[in-house]
Image: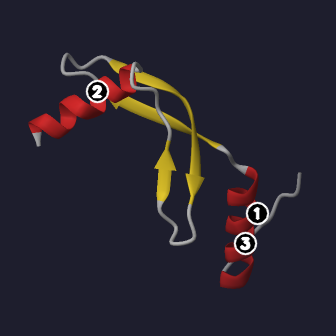
Amino acid sequence: MRYYTLGNNLERAKAAYALLMSNMRTVVLGTVSNQGIPNVSYAPFVIDEAKNIYIFVSKVSIHTSNLQAMVKRV
């Protein structure tokens, strides 16, 4: 694995970001229940050409329940 020191070089920062994103396939997803109980786990994701991020969670996962409850509260 290569490590970069970026300093103020924007092009190097962009290259390091591209390298990081090309190697990453999971995110750490954290959600909180209505009762305030945290849940953290890994989840797979993809990024499309427009840089939209899609995180995949199961319909039966705790995260899905927490996210759906959050949408109802907003």
Q: Residues within 10 Å of mark 1 (few under 14, many from 20)?
A: few
Instruction: Report the quarter where the C terminus lies.
Output: top left
Q: In the drawing, what numbered circle is on residue 32?
A: none
Residue 9 visible in the shown view:
no
Q: Look at mark 1 in the image and give the residue it sits on.
A: 19
Nearest to the observer: residue 36 or residue 61: 61
Amino acid beneath label 1: Leu
Mark 1 touching mark 2, by CB under 8 A?
no
The percent position of residue 21, horizontal first and vertical second, equals 68, 58
The percent position of residue 26, horizontal first and vertical second, equals 62, 40
Q: Residues within 10 Å of mark 3 (few under 14, many from 20)?
A: few
Task: Report how far apart the C-alphas of labels 3 and 2 lie in the structure.
Answer: 37 Å
Res 3 quadrant in image: bottom right
Helix, strand or loop under label 1 = helix
Q: Look at mark 3 in the image and give the residue it sits on.
A: 6
Q: Residue at x 67, y 66 (%)?
A: 17
Res 2 quadrant in image: bottom right
Task: Report how far apart the C-alphas of labels 1 and 2 lie in the structure.
Answer: 32 Å
Residue 41 visible in the shown view:
yes
Mark 1 touching mark 3, by CB under 8 A?
no
Q: Look at mark 2 in the image and give the residue it sits on.
A: 66
Amino acid beneath label 3: Leu
